[in-house]
Structure formats: structure tokens, C-alpha cells
Image (spheres, rainbow, N blue to C red):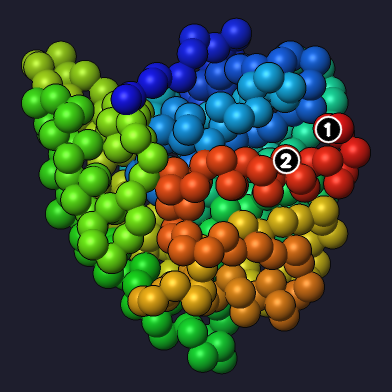
């Protein structure tokens, strides 16, 4: 049931200021509105193909991974931080129009990349015709009732990531682990083929045989730990939009973390918000068609799609 992403129309390796390289892959309709698509911590954008495939017929879909993820070459661990990701996004937003022309541009970002997009928008002039944020894992302000839970959850994720198994004989091994972890009895399953697709997207072949994580566990843990200290949420009201939060269902039994925080934040700051019933943090792979429909409706409201 696994279906890999198609070959890109074009590939552009963009050098960052500190020597890191971000590989951008162009898919879809080159004359359509531009969607920049990226992923969550330790994941990779090709693994989200069950979601972004719904836009390749009428949008230009530019898929890229955060530094030290997916198809990008490994760079320094000391430069693996949110500030670097924000600077990388600023570089991409400057360089991509130079290479491939200017046009209406929308960010479609999950988890870590959603946090990066918000941090970028708070530090730079608003660059988007619209921004879609899938379940950003914000840690709210210390006076928020959910602060302790959100901070503890990010630190727990950091501890787990630090113990992450680094090597696999075959992507199917990691796919089985993803299915066990993400699609257990308390979570909805990903669509057929998605576990294998994500496993292939986050692994790279080793010269000595087998496969290794593109983003090592130590790098992943560093970002979870840093995310627990960021203070972005008090300034969410400064974002001019258009902006759409698509989030995990806070009414789902056992809902916690981003599902609860994002409902509170969207209400407090007046941003558009929708939580598909039953969805968890990985909603784009559980309900890709529904997530694509909601994203498409947002694009239609901005007048770029019929």
C-alpha cells in the first residue's frame, strides 16, 4: 500500500549563512499558488505525502526538511536550534522567489516547523499570503494553567529522544516501531502506507550497510528541550494573518499537550481554529483528506483557488 512521492519537477539546494544546506523539492503545478510544506521534530516532509499529494494538481508544492532532517546533509549539532531554523526560513523566503519567481505563498507547517514559522513571523515582517499551522506544540506562559503539563511533556519527549535507536537494518523495522508507537490502542491509525513512507523519509543509507536516522536522537532531544523554554504564546496576537490553526481534538479521551494548549490560545488571540474530531498530533497522516479539505477551503477564502 506504500506509495512514494513522485520525482520532483526541480530540486534546489539552498546554502544557509552558516554553511548548512536545505534541499527544496518542487512538485505539482508550477503556475499555481506556492505552498511551502515542512514537518515536525525528527520527521521529514516526504513522509507527509498522503497529505500534500492533494495539492499537486493545482498548486506549486515546495517540500523541504528542517536542517539535519530528511534529505539535508548533516550539519553541526551546536547550530541545531530554533534560531537556526528561523534563519533558514528567512533565507528560503528570500532565495526561492529569486530562483523560481514571486507569487502568492502559503506556509503549511506541522509541529516543529509551525513553531519555527511563528518565531520567524514575530522577528520579521509578515511574509505570507496565509499560514496554516498543524498542531504547533507551544509551551504557554508560566501563568497559564497548562504550563506545567506542556513543559513536562516536552522534557519527557527530550528524554525519550536521547535514547532513540539510531540504526536499522531496513526501513520496515522503523515502520513497525512507528505503528506500535503512533497507532496503538489509544490512537487512531495512520492511513495505509504512511508508516512505511515516514520510515523511508527519516532514514538514510549507511556506507557500512543498513540505515541511520537522518536526525540523530541527540539532535531531536535538543529541540524538545529548547521548545519547553520558548516564550512565543504571549505574542500570538501580534500575528496579522491570515492564519489557520488545524489541531488535535481537545475533546478526544486522553487529549493533552498541544490539543489543549492550542484551543486555549486560538480562543484567547482570535485566530481561526479547527480540530477534526478524533484527531491527534499526527492528524495529517490520520485524516489526510479531511486536513487537505480544510486547508483548501482556507486557500479558497484567500482567493487563490476556485
Q: Earlier in the sequence, mark 2 or mark 1?
A: 2
Labels 2 and 1 touching (C-beta < 8 A):
yes
Q: Position of residue 54 (x, y in %)?
A: 61, 30
At 87% across and 44% down in the image, what residue appears?
Answer: 302
Q: Residues within 10 Å of mark 2 (few under 14, many from 20)?
A: some
Please identify the quadrant where the C terminus is shown.
Answer: top right
52 over 239 or under it: above or below? above
Residue nearest the viewer, comparing 253 with 74 = 253
* Residue 195 visible, this orientation: yes
At 33% across and 50% down in the image, what residue appears?
Answer: 189
185 over 15 or under it: above or below? below
Q: Position of residue 286 (x, y in %)?
A: 43, 48
User: Which residue is identified by label 1?
Assistant: 305
Residue nearest the viewer, comparing 209 with 273 = 273
Q: Residues within 10 Å of mark 1 (few under 14, many from 20)?
A: some
User: Which residue is identified by label 2?
Assistant: 296
Position of 6 with respect to 30 (left or right) is left
Q: Position of residue 95 (x, y in %)?
A: 71, 24
Amino acid at each position: 500500500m506504500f506509495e512514494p512521492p513522485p520525482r520532483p519537477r526541480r530540486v534546489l539546494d539552498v546554502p544557509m549563512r552558516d554553511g548548512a544546506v536545505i534541499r527544496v523539492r518542487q512538485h505539482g503545478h508550477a503556475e499555481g499558488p506556492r505552498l511551502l510544506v515542512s514537518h515536525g521534530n525528527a520527521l521529514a516532509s516526504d513522509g507527509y505525502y498522503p497529505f500534500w499529494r492533494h495539492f499537486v494538481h493545482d498548486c506549486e508544492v515546495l517540500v523541504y526538511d528542517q536542517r539535519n532532517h530528511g534529505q539535508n546533509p548533516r550539519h553541526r549539532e551546536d547550530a541545531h536550534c530554533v534560531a537556526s531554523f528561523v534563519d533558514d526560513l528567512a533565507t528560503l523566503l528570500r532565495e526561492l522567489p529569486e530562483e523560481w519567481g514571486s507569487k502568492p505563498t502559503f506556509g503549511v507547517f506541522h509541529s516543529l516547523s509551525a513553531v519555527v514559522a511563528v518565531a520567524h513571523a514575530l522577528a520579521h515582517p509578515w511574509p505570507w499570503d496565509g499560514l496554516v499551522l498543524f498542531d504547533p506544540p507551544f509551551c504557554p506562559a508560566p501563568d497559564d494553567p497548562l504550563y506545567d503539563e506542556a513543559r513536562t511533556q516536552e522534557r519527557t519527549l527530550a528524554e525519550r529522544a536521547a535514547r532513540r535507536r539510531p540504526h536499522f537494518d531496513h526501513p520496515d523495522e522503523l515502520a513497525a516501531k512507528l505503528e506500535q508507537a503512533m497507532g496503538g490502542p489509544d490512537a487512531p491509525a495512520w492511513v495505509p502506507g504512511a508508516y512505511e513512507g515516514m520510515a523511508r523519509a527519516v532514514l538514510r543509507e549507511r556506507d557500512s550497510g543498513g540505515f541511520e536516522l537522518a536526525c540523530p536522537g541527540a539532535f531531536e532531544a535538543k529541540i524538545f528541550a529548547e521548545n519547553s523554554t520558548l516564550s512565543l504564546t504571549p505574542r500570538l496576537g501580534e500575528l496579522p494573518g491570515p492564519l489557520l490553526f488545524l489541531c488535535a481534538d481537545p475533546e478526544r479521551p486522553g487529549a493533552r499537550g498541544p490539543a489543549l494548549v492550542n484551543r486555549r490560545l486560538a480562543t484567547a488571540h482570535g485566530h481561526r481554529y479547527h480540530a477534526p474530531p478524533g484527531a491527534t498530533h499526527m492528524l495529517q497522516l490520520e485524516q489526510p483528506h479531511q486536513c487537505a479539505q480544510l486547508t483548501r477551503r482556507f486557500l479558497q477564502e484567500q482567493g487563490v483557488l476556485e
